[in-house]
Amino acid sequence: MKRVLYPGSFDPFTNGHLDLVRRACKLFDEVIVGVAVNSGKSPMFDMEERKSLIEQSCAGMPQVRVVTISGLMSKAIKQFDAQALLRGLRVFSDYEYELQMALANRSLEPDCETIFMNPTHQNSFISSSLVKEIAGLGGDISEYVPPAVASAVYAKAGK
Ligand code: COA
């Protein structure tokens, strides 16, 4: 079985992430979305909230499984028996950070491959921080995130 692990902080999951999951479903038998910790970020949603929002957003996609990951990604890829990590490359400036992370993961675990996919250009400017900022200032985020995520972000932002 071809299985890929798509990790991220997903705080929150956006239409850009969903776009990548849909594309990966065409290439892999199973796509595991891994809600992970980025120690540099202070999340709006806890891990279980993020997991639940992704599950709601991917309802009806039987190839998708959502998990939470608390340790190293290079260990999680083995734990979930995935052949590769999947990361999204939206714009050129993503590349340097992604390359560093892919090489670090491979240094920790020599078998750890990372593959990159691009979302459609309509989704290329979306980021989780942008969505939270727009919602916090009373803007409309319905074009950028799945409906369940929009309601949850508005509720957290008190809008
Ligand atoms: N569409 C829309 N937005 C996207 C996107 C896409 N296809 N791909 C990435 N983004 C955005 C995210 O929303 C996020 O936005 P934000 O910075 O405003 O929150 C940003 O791009 C970064 O993407 P994300 O996938 O959330 O990555 P991350 O950098 O937060 O996640 C981890 C990094 C969690 C995968 C990494 O820290 C990790 O592996 N942690 C586990 C511990 C570990 O092993 N650390 C060592 C790593 S070498």
Image: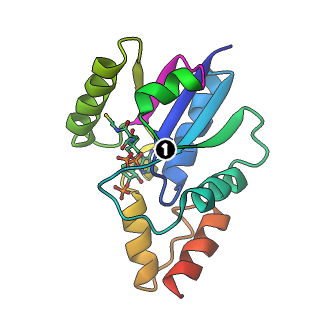
Figure coloring: rainbow
Vertical relation: 104 (above or below) 156: above
- Residue 103 position in % (x across, y down): 26, 23
Which quadrant: the C terminus?
A: bottom right
Residue at image coords 43%, 64%: 43
- Residue 8 position in % (x across, y down): 45, 45
Which quadrant: the N terminus?
A: top right
45 relative to 110 in the view: left or right: right
Q: Which residues are magenta?
A: 80-88
- Residue 14 position in % (x across, y down): 52, 56
Observer able to see residue 117: no
**Element under label 1?**
loop
Count up the numbered dots: 1
Foreground of the two, 84 or 88: 84
User: Residue 4: which quarter of the image?
Assistant: top right
Residue at image coords 69%, 51%: 55
Crowd tier of the residue under label 1, counting other residues whose Cα lies within 10 Å: few below 14, some 14–19, many 20 or above: few
Vertical relation: 110 (above or below) 127: above
Residue tagged 1 = 70
Vertical relation: 6 (above or below) 1: below
User: Residue 23: which quarter of the image?
Assistant: top right
64 relative to 152 in the view: left or right: right
The answer as to whether callout 1 falls within 8 Å of ligand 1 is no
- Residue 22 position in % (x across, y down): 62, 37
Observer able to see residue 132: yes
Tell me which amino acid carries mark 1: Ser
Residue at image coords 41%, 11%: 111
Residue 78: within the magenta? no
Residue at image coords 57%, 47%: 18
